[in-house]
Image: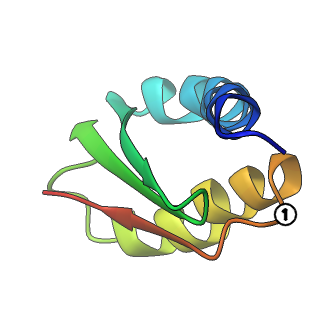
């Protein structure tokens, strides 16, 4: 997968996740993709102070991104 394909597929994954976050008053934005393996995102809105945002990040966001781009090794939130 080219770097552009990785970016497009990560964005598709975020588009799949976004409605669930928005229904709780939150959102997510892509910050960067490093070495086509490490994704940095920013949780926004109500997600910032949510006590389960790390679970959401790992169980929801990271899992969905890996479904679209299996080569991704880690997704981290920049606060």
Q: In this view, does 35 lie above or below 47?
A: below
- 36 or 60, which lies in front? 36
Q: Residue at x 60, y 56 (%)?
A: 36
Q: Colour scheme of this structure image?
A: rainbow
Which picture quadrant has residue 76? bottom left
- The percent coordinates of residue 10 (x first, y second) are 65, 38
Left or right of 36: which side holds 46? left
Residue 13 in sight here: yes
- The percent coordinates of residue 21 (x first, y second) are 48, 35
Q: Which residue is drawn at 41% across and 34% down?
A: 24
- The percent coordinates of residue 2 (x first, y second) are 76, 39
Q: Is residue 62 above or below residue 14?
A: below
Residue named by callout 1: 70
Q: How crowded is mark 1: few (under 14 residues within 10 Å), some or many (20 or more)?
A: few
Q: In this view, does 8 lie above or below 33?
A: above
Q: What element carries label 1?
A: loop
- The percent coordinates of residue 68 (x first, y second) are 84, 46
Left or right of 48: which side holds 58? right
Left or right of 5: which side holds 62? left
Counting labels gives 1
Image quarter of the N terminus: top right
Image quarter of the C terminus: bottom left
Which picture quadrant has residue 50? bottom left
Q: Which residue is drawn at 28% across and 45% down?
A: 42
Residue 46 in sight here: no
- 7 or 63, which lies in front? 7
Q: Residue at x 62, y 63 (%)?
A: 62
């Amino acid at each position: 997968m080219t770097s552009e394909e990785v970016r497009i597929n990560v964005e598709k994954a975020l588009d799949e996740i976004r409605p669930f976050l928005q229904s709780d008053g939150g959102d997510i934005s892509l910050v960067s993709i490093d070495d086509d393996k490490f994704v940095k995102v920013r949780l926004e809105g109500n997600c910032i102070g949510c006590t389960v945002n790390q679970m959401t990040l790992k169980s929801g966001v990271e899992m969905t991104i890996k479904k679209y781009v299996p080569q991704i090794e880690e997704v981290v939130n920049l606060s």
